[in-house]
Image (cartoon, rainbow, N blue to C red):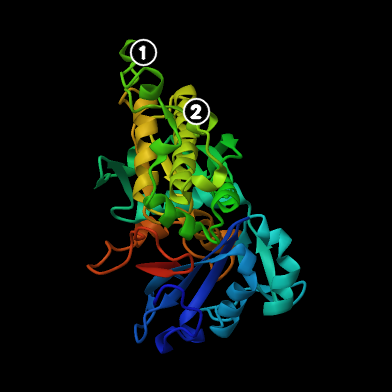
Amino acid sequence: MDAGFHGKLDADQSESQISHLALDIGGTLIKLVYFSRNKGRPIDENKNSKNSVIEGRLHFAKFETSKINDCLEFILSNKLHLGGFRHHVDPASDKILIKATGGGAYRFADLIKEKLGVSIEKEEEMECLVAGANFLLKAVHQEAYTYMDGRKEFVHIDHNDLYPYLLVNIGSGVSMIKVDDDGKFERISGTSVGGGTFWGLGRLLTKCKSFDELLKLSHQGNNRVIDMLVGDIYGGLDYSKIGLSSTTIASSFGKAISDNRELEEYKPEDIARSLLRMISNNIGQIAYLNALQFGLKRIFFGGFFIRSHAFTLDTISVAVNFWSKGEAKAMFLNHEGFLGALGAFMSYKKRGRDDSISPQLGQRYPVCTPRVGDKICYPLNEDLNDFDSLECSVYVA
C-alpha cells in the first residue's frame, strides 16, 4: 500500500481474511499489527493434533495519536476489528475483544468502544515490548543490525546465547529494560528525554508540524553552527590528554551563549540537527552506562524515534562506541517501532483460548526471510502514516 493510505484494503484482505488486530497506543503514535491469510491458501490442518497452520502476512501501520479518529476510521472501514479465523468475545459484555497496550489503551478505551463497538483487553506495556523484541530476534532473519560509518550490517542472533540483553525503547520517553529470558525482565532505568522531547522542543523552536518534517529538516542542518565543540574551546586543537578530538561536542547549543544573534537568525535546520544530536547522544550514553552496570554485552534499540534515520543511527552508535571505548556496539531492529504492538498480538495465545496463537510461533513457523522488494527497513524520512507487511505462518490451537 502507498504511504499515507487511509482507504479500503485490497479485495484479498477482506473481513474473512483478517484476524488478530492488536494496538499499541502511545503518547505520540498508535501502532497497529494485524494478520491476513493468503487468499486462496487453505488452512493446513494437522490431523494428528488440534493445531493448524495458517499462511499469510503480518501487517504494520501507524498513526499519530492526536489523529486517533483517523486510525479508528481506518479500522472501521476495513473491518479489521471484525475479521478472524475465530472471534474473541468478552463473555461479560458479549462484545468482540481486541488486544491493546500502552497508556492510550486506558485513555481511549471508552472512545474505542463507542466508535468500534468492541471491548479492549489491556496488556501490560513492558511485557509486550519484551515479547515483541524476543519474537523479532528469534523469528525474523536479518532483523538486528549495526550502523557505523554509514554502513548497515546485519547481526547473526544465536538463539541459545541471546540473553541477557538490554532493550532500549525510545518512544515519547525512554525505557531501558534488562531482559533475562522469555517473560523474565526488569525495567532498570529510563529517561524523560526521548522522542517526545525532540518533537516538542523542535516544534517550539522550528515551527515544524510533524515528527517527520522535523527529521527531514535535521538532515539539511549543521549542528556545528550551534554546538560548542572541544576545538572551539582549545583553538581548533584536540584535547588529546583525555581522549577528546576537536570535533567532540563540549556543550550542546553552547555557541548560542556567545553568539550575539537573535533566535530568528538561527537556521531551523541547524537547530533541528543540534537537537537530534543532543538527544541521541544522551540516550546512547545512558544506555551504555546501564549496560555496563549490569554487565550486559548486547544493547538493542527500538522505538519510532529512530525511524532508520541515518543521523540518529550514527549518533547513537558513536555514543555507545565512545563511552565503551569500542567494546560495545549499538544494535537496532528493522521493525523497531512495533515491539509493543507485536507483543500485544502475541498475547492472543494467553488464557488457553481455542483461538490462541502458538507461543512457539517464531520457532516452529518462522517469519520468512524478506523477499526481494519487501519493505522491511523503513526508508529515510518516511511519511508518518505508512504501511508494511511481512510474510509469516501463524500456528493456532
Q: Nearer the viewer, residue 333 or 367?
A: 333
Residue at the location (56% across, 83% down)? 79
- In the picture, measured across the screen, residue 224 lies left or right of residue 95, that is left
Mark 2 lies on residue? 290
* Tag 1: amino acid: Ile
Disc ID at residue 169: none
Q: Quadrant of the N terminus?
A: bottom left
> Are the two marked residues, 1 and 2, in contact with CB atoms closer than 8 angstroms?
no
Which residue is drawn at the image coordinates 34% and 83% (left, top)?
41
From the image, tell me which residue sits under label 1.
242
Q: Position of residue 232 (x, y in %)?
A: 39, 24
At x 25% / y 69%, what residue is drawn? 373
Q: Secondary structure at mark 1?
A: helix
Q: Is residue 237 visible?
A: yes
Neighbour class for label 1 at 10 Å: few (<14), some, many (≥20)?
A: few
* 173 w.r.t. 77: above or below: above
Residue located farthest toward the front when viewing the structure as drawn? 260
Mark 2 is surrounded, within 10 Å at the Cα level, by few (under 14), some (14 to 19) or many (20 or more) other residues, namely some
Residue 162 in sight here: no
- Using the rendered view, name the quadrant where residue 366 is placed: bottom left
Mark 1 to mark 2 CA distance (whole Å): 23 Å
The tally of labels here is: 2
Q: Residue at x 55, y 52 (%)?
A: 128
Give the image location of residue 343, x and y in percent. 52, 56
* Amino acid, disc 2: Asn
Give percent across and percent down for residue 148. 28, 39
Q: Nearer the viewer, mark 1 or mark 2?
A: 1
- Front residue of 243/369: it is 243
First in residue order: circle 1 vs circle 2: 1
